[in-house]
Amino acid sequence: MKRFFDATRIALVFTLIFTLSLAGFSHDTAKPGISTLSAVTADSVALLPSSDAVAVVDVARLVNELLPQFRAIAPGQAVKFEQEISEFINETGIDPYKIKSAVIGVKMSDSNSVSAIIEGITFDPNRLITAIKGKDNKQEVKTLDYKGKQIFVVTSTKAAKARGNEEMAFTQLDADRVALGNLTGVKTALDGGNGASNTALNTLLAQTSNALIRFAANIPDTAKRGLAEQGDMFAQFSTIKTVFGSLDLTRELSLLLDTKLRTGSSDEASKLQTSLAALVGLGKMFLGGNNDPAIQALTQVIDLVKINAQDTDVALSLMIPKSVFDQFAEAEKKKEKK
């Protein structure tokens, strides 16, 4: 199952690969967009199993806008990366460059189960199964019919012996969308999803701006109780009902995080703002006086955090300029030389 997991992660890991490489990217076209949510994306969210959190990754933009810069900045790594993708395409027939978006849902109260619907994939079952099994046949692939669709269940034989049939399922939902997750999650998508339970998340996502990543989460009661038990400083965090926002790049090559923490009242929001500000202050005090360049850069990041109460919401925003990423990169280079 390793190759298949590696393949499906390409769509999801694009975010991490390029976010961590921001220090060298040149980017002129990124612009925070007016808040919209495409019908396809909203439908994908609705098709997910009941989720506590959802993230929407604009994979097409990551590939079209950032990959060319990755080639210019780190040509050696880019060549290796693209060779691996080329090998994957040859083996599976799936072209990750054609992926449009990835919608990922997480159920925190269910062993952190993860489901995903990826738009822009069509696969040949026989070719893909052959690639998954590989030459060593360490992966087992079973097929079952459900609601007129074929579901493919991949099990690692080694994992099956050690942990009891650890598995992943996937199916072709429609012309170019694939559902991934455990068998129950994939069946849920074919059943029409949990649109009713995910409606609130779709509503929150629609309030975020067009960005590389958009996210929304309902905070489970178990998490709230856990926060309330951590002492006075964290007590106000238990009043957070939902969190939503976006992560994007600006024209100035800055990383922009825009998040809102929604409480039940303006009083709760005001107290939460105070708690957050105190926590940020403690962090700065803890790091103060450290001459390590990386720590100094981190202190700059803390200084850039903006926290404001807005009715029942607490808006937390952070714009990290390219110069800060340059400092981190320079600090790492010096450590490597030592």
Image (cartoon, rainbow, N blue to C red):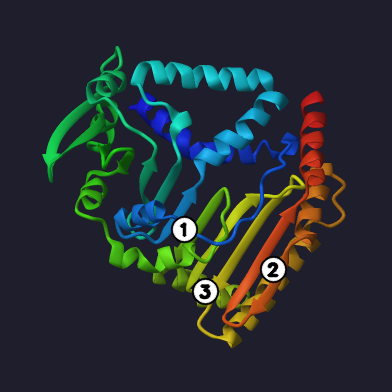
Q: Nearer the viewer, residue 57 or 181?
A: 57
Query: How far apart, in angstroms, are the residues tagged by discs 1 and 2?
Result: 34 Å
**254 displayed left or right of 105:** right
The crowding category of the residue bearing disc 3, from other C-alpha atoms within 10 Å (few below 14, some 14 to 19, many at least 20), is many
Q: Position of residue 128 (x, y in %)?
A: 29, 23
Residue 163 appears in which quarter of the rendering? top left
Image-based side of 30 in relation to 56, left or right:
right
For badge 2, the amino acid type reads: Leu
Between 94 and 29, the residue placed more toward the observer is 29
Q: Is residue 111 visible?
A: no
* Rendered position, 56 above or below 219: above
Vertical order, 123 against 12 (above or below) = above
Element under disc 3: loop
Please state the horizontal and vertical placement of residue 7, each as a whole percent of the image.
41, 29
Q: Nearer the viewer, mark 1 or mark 2?
A: 1
Circle count: 3
Q: Quadrant of the C terminus?
A: top right
Picture quadrant where residue 70 is located: top right
Lateral position of residue 132 relative to residue 103, left or right: left
Whichever of labels 1 and 2 marks the residue nearer the N terminus, that label is 1
Q: Position of residue 109 (x, y in %)?
A: 35, 60
Residue at which label 3 appears:
240
> Of marks 3 and 2, which one's residue comes earlier in the chain?
3
Separation of disc 3 and disc 2 at Cα? 16 Å
Q: For marks 3 and 1, give the one nearer the viewer.
A: 1
The residue under label 1 is which amino acid type?
Leu
Q: Which residue is mark 2?
A: 279
- Residue at the spot 30% in from the left edge and 28% down from the top edge: 123
